[in-house]
């Protein structure tokens, strides 16, 4: 089984600083996302899935944009499952809640803790769905976790807090190892601190369970690699 | 503060309001006051006589600065509560007079109440007011839109530099406090500045209250008589001495929300906090309960605005 | 507010102890800790003290070792100001700046690494700036298996050193990281029968002044409405209008005509900063006013001083409160801080402690430090630059 762990907003520098061995795996590095005008979540993930720059199409209706399974690398597999992947199997309402909460926070209506609570709840659901999918014997499973990105937007500058979030993702990576030999951990973009907040950085993160000699791969390069099952 | 103002809604406060009038009167007419003691979690008589020590220490530093620098000394007044308290202490130090010129750095976009208060107090206290304004930059259209750091540098730092040069000031009295920020904690009472920059890595020794000022022509000094005061000490002192402060610090209802400024400055870069504290007592109580540092609000404002814009661009909001 | 200076090497756990204190007394900026706590809860993780340390570390990053910093906390109704002073010899003047603002000191020693030269230097310097209340926190007990033997060894060595200096110190074995004996008693050190760190700290009270008589040093002369007003802080005691004061130098007597605070008042007492008008005498900065008893007239003094810059057999300025006179410093001996042996010397460098003879060109009026610190402390300056100091014992 091949597992792809999509970790939205995972920042390369923090992975290194917090010494997250399970996230770093056998080889890791930064991804090139310079082909996009802005590092937007839906755009980058859908481009990752299809191996093409989907920016133009996606921008027409960002949060409703969906690519077809035939267009993605999943088409090369007999059985697949993609959980909550942006631009594909995204659970709209779940994440719309997050965005609403973000707006409320900036309007001064709710506190950071209240915002975080919504992110943690969604995370719990994503985790449940992901680990059940791993037991069902698919050829390829892609899980998606938005935690680092969502919490990061409001708290990336608070290293202590982010350390805990990264620790959690570490544990998910560790647990996944029990199910698959080929694991690709990938993020759409990283983050950079703006005071206590987090803005998107202009590079992403990748890591693989085996030695992969990649030098600054474009996010669209992975599609082919996955289709070829990394051989 | 009258006895009536202590009457409020919490049971702890009711308890105090129920105390014998005579007992309370003693409190009000001396250094004692009824305040909320956080560590004991109830209303208790809080001893404010320690304010005398803070006051005496500040006056000593102010008088020392005047002795060393005489007419080459000036006061930096932002019209905020800290510098107004410092100004009050200068007035006390010199027996009711303010013989030192007062500089107000005017970015021309301060909140209106600041200007009104400034002019009123300047008149009442007979201040030698110098207004520092970078006319050139303002004419050229400088504003926070060009970048907050650039704006502050041009309209504040540059304006001050011009005034200091024009009048030949060698030392400035500034009201910074150690508890404002981690790095402020390192400041000295008499702090040398080379070309307006602070070399925090090489500060002079300040043993007890012996302030040695090595005077060289290029060196300027910042004198900080308020270093040892905390935010809450300033408010308690303001209450005790009945020092006038800008109304912006007190809560008002704006568009259905109760807001007040914890820290004041220029209109575009200053955001109020949600608070119902509309009297000094309530502000003190709020401070006794909260642990959020004062400047937290200010720095976060700039970042908050940046994030809001960015998140919109990324499609989040 | 009790000012407590924390001295010791960072590696001995000074910042961990400060972090632990703030944490155990609930004095940390709640907002940051609350968020972290809630995140842990939501993810089913335990909130560890190590997170607090990380938070504090982040805030102080590369500013940590260089200069002093202040943090406040309250415990059982008392307020404390922690003055965190750097340990390294290079930053001694910063450590002393911090120490002179304190009423008590905490010396942190690691049970694992034991006593270093730095530890002894700090202890001596604390004595020289007049701090008599010292708590020695023997930290990192968790790394030596909470061994009573190790603790007693450190205690013995330091106690000997301290008693030769005349310092009375309290010793407490702690683990700042694990929290043993800081706020709560340790189950792992049942052999220890003393109080916890916080309990000991709680018992420290600010010294009560030993002098009740009026003392004031003139800081400046201010002219207002044709009157000469002498400005200064009352160092001790009180003054009433029409009372007679004795003026030093000169021993002349004069009557107090006005007391201004700044409004005219009949009476003022310590610690007020006042303005005073006398009947006839003409004074200047540096004069000392006294009532009832007289201050000690010092023309020459042989004592220990600490140096924060080079001091030689030279002419310098001697400063005590607002008094400043020219003096000649003759260095007799330098003290070896390790074994307290003295050797003849003619130069003192930064960090040295020496026995000197100071001859003053004009008399200076002082009190013993234990009696009145304001008139008991002195500094030595060279061209307006502080190079050393000490106290009158």
Image (spheres, coloured by chain):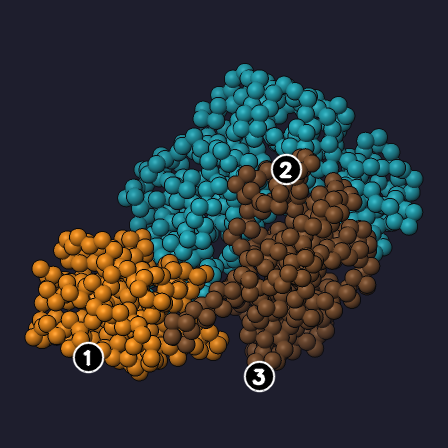
Chain colours: A orange, B brown, C cyan
Report how far apart the C-alphas of labels 2 and 3 lie in the structure: 60 Å
Residue linked to disc 1: A68
Residue at 67% across / 49% down in the picture?
B161
Discs 1 and 3 carry the same chain letter: no
Residue at 17% across / 66% down in the picture?
A223
Residue A120 shows up from this direction: no
Secondary structure of the residue carrying numbered label 2: loop
Q: Total label count?
A: 3
Residue linked to disc 2: C370
Q: Which of B300 and C233 is in front in this view?
A: B300
Residue at 57% across / 83% down in the picture?
B256
Residue C289: x and y, percent? 80, 39
Disc 1 or disc 3, which is closer to the eye? 1
Residue B273: x and y, percent? 55, 71
Residue B205 shows up from this direction: yes
Report how far apart the C-alphas of labels 1 and 3 lie in the structure: 48 Å
Residue at 80% across / 55% down in the picture?
B128
Q: Which residue lies furthest to the top in this view?
A: C344
Label at residue B99: none
Residue B307: x and y, percent? 45, 68
- Chain letter for mark 2: C
Left or right: C17 in relation to B190: left
Callout 2: 10 Å neighbours few (<14), some, many (20+)?
Answer: many
| Quadrant occupied by the N terminus of chain A | bottom left
Discs 1 and 2 carry the same chain letter: no
Report how far apart the C-alphas of labels 1 and 2 lie in the structure: 85 Å
Residue linked to disc 3: B256
- Chain letter for mark 3: B
Callout 1: 10 Å neighbours few (<14), some, many (20+)?
Answer: some
């Amino acid at each position: 089984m091949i597992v792809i762990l999509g970790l939205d907003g995972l920042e390369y520098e923090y992975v290194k600083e917090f010494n997250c061995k399970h996230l770093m795996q056998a080889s890791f590095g930064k991804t090139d996302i310079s082909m996009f005008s802005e590092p937007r979540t839906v755009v980058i993930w859908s481009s990752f899935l299809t191996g093409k720059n989907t920016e133009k199409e996606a921008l027409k209706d960002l949060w409703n944009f969906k690519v077809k399974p035939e267009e993605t690398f999943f088409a090369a597999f007999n059985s697949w499952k993609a959980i909550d992947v942006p631009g594909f199997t995204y659970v709209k309402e779940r994440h719309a809640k997050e965005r609403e909460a973000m707006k409320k926070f900036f309007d001064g209506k709710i506190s950071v803790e209240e915002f975080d609570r919504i992110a943690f709840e969604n995370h719990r659901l994503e985790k449940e769905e992901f680990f059940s999918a791993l037991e069902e014997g698919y050829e390829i499973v892609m899980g998606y976790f938005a935690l680092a990105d969502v919490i990061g937007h409001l708290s990336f500058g608070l290293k202590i807090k982010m350390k805990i979030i990264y620790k959690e993702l570490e544990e998910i990576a560790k647990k996944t190892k029990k199910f698959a030999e080929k694991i690709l951990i990938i993020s759409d973009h990283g983050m950079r601190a703006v005071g206590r907040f987090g803005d998107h950085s202009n590079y992403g993160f990748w890591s693989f369970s085996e030695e992969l000699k990649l030098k600054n791969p474009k996010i669209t390069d992975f599609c082919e690699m996955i289709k070829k099952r990394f051989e | 503060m009258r006895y009536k103002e202590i009457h409020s809604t919490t049971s702890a406060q009711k308890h105090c309001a129920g105390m014998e009038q005579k007992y309370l009167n003693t409190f009000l007419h001396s250094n004692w006051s009824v305040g909320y003691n956080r560590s004991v979690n109830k209303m208790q008589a809080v001893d404010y006589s320690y304010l005398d020590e803070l006051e005496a220490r500040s006056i000593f530093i102010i008088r020392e600065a005047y002795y060393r620098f005489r007419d080459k000394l000036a006061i930096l007044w932002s019209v905020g509560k800290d510098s107004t308290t410092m100004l009050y202490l200068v007035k006390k130090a010199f027996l009711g007079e303010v013989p030192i010129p007062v500089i107000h750095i005017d970015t021309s976009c301060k909140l209106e109440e600041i200007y009104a208060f400034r002019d009123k107090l300047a008149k009442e206290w007979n201040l030698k007011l110098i207004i520092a304004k970078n006319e050139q930059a303002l004419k050229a259209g400088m504003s926070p839109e060009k970048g907050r750091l650039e704006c502050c540098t041009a309209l504040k730092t540059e304006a001050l530099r011009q005034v200091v040069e024009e009048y030949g000031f060698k030392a400035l009295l500034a009201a910074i406090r150690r508890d404002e920020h981690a790095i402020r904690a390192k400041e000295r009472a008499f702090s040398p500045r080379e070309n307006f920059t602070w070399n925090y890595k090489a500060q002079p020794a300040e043993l007890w209250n012996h302030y040695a000022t090595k005077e060289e022509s290029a060196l300027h000094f910042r004198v900080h008589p308020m270093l040892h005061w905390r935010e809450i000490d300033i408010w308690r002192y303001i209450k005790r001495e009945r020092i006038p402060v800008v109304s912006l610090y007190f809560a008002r209802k704006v568009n259905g929300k109760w807001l007040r400024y914890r820290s004041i400055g220029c209109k575009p870069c200053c955001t109020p906090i949600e608070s119902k504290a509309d009297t000094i007592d309530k502000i003190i109580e709020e401070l006794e309960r909260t642990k959020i540092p004062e400047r937290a609000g200010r720095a976060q404002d700039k970042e908050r605005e940046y994030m809001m814009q960015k998140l919109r661009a990324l499609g989040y909001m | 507010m009790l000012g407590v200076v924390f001295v010791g090497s960072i590696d001995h756990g000074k910042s961990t102890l400060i972090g632990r204190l703030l944490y155990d007394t609930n004095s940390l900026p709640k907002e940051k800790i609350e968020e972290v706590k809630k995140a842990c809860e939501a993810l089913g993780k335990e909130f560890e003290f190590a997170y607090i340390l990380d938070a504090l570390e982040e805030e102080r990053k590369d500013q940590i070792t260089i200069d002093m910093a202040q943090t406040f906390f309250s415990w059982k109704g008392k307020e404390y100001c922690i003055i965190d002073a750097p340990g390294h010899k290079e930053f001694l003047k910063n450590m002393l700046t911090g120490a002179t603002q304190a009423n008590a000191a905490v010396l942190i020693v690691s049970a694992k690494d034991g006593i270093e030269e730095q530890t002894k230097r700090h202890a001596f310097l604390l004595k020289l700036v007049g701090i008599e209340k010292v708590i020695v926190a023997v930290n990192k007990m968790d790394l030596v298996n909470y061994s009573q033997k190790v603790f007693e060894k450190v205690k013995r060595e330091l106690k000997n050193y301290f008693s030769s200096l005349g310092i009375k110190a309290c010793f407490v074995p702690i683990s700042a990281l694990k929290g043993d004996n800081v706020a709560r008693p340790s189950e792992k050190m049942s052999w220890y029968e003393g109080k916890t760190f916080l309990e000991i700290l709680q018992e420290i009270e600010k010294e009560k002044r030993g002098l009740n008589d009026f003392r004031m040093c003139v800081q400046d002369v201010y002219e207002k409405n044709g009157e000469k007003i002498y400005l200064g802080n009352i160092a001790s005691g009180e003054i009433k209008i029409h009372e007679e004061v004795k003026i030093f130098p000169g021993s002349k007597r004069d009557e107090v005509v006005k007391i201004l605070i700044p409004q005219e008042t009949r009476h003022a007492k310590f610690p007020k900063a006042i303005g005073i008008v006398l009947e006839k005498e003409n004074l200047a900065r540096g004069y000392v006013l006294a009532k009832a008893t007289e201050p000690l007239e010092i023309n020459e003094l042989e004592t220990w001083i600490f140096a924060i810059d080079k001091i030689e057999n030279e002419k310098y300025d001697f400063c005590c409160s607002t008094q400043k006179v020219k003096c000649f410093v003759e260095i007799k001996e330098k003290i070896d801080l390790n074994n307290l042996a003295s050797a003849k010397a003619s130069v003192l460098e930064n960090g040295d402690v020496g026995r000197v003879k100071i001859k003053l060109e004009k008399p200076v009026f002082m009190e013993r430090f234990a009696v009145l610190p304001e008139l008991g402390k002195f500094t030595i300056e060279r061209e307006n630059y502080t190079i050393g100091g000490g106290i009158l014992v």
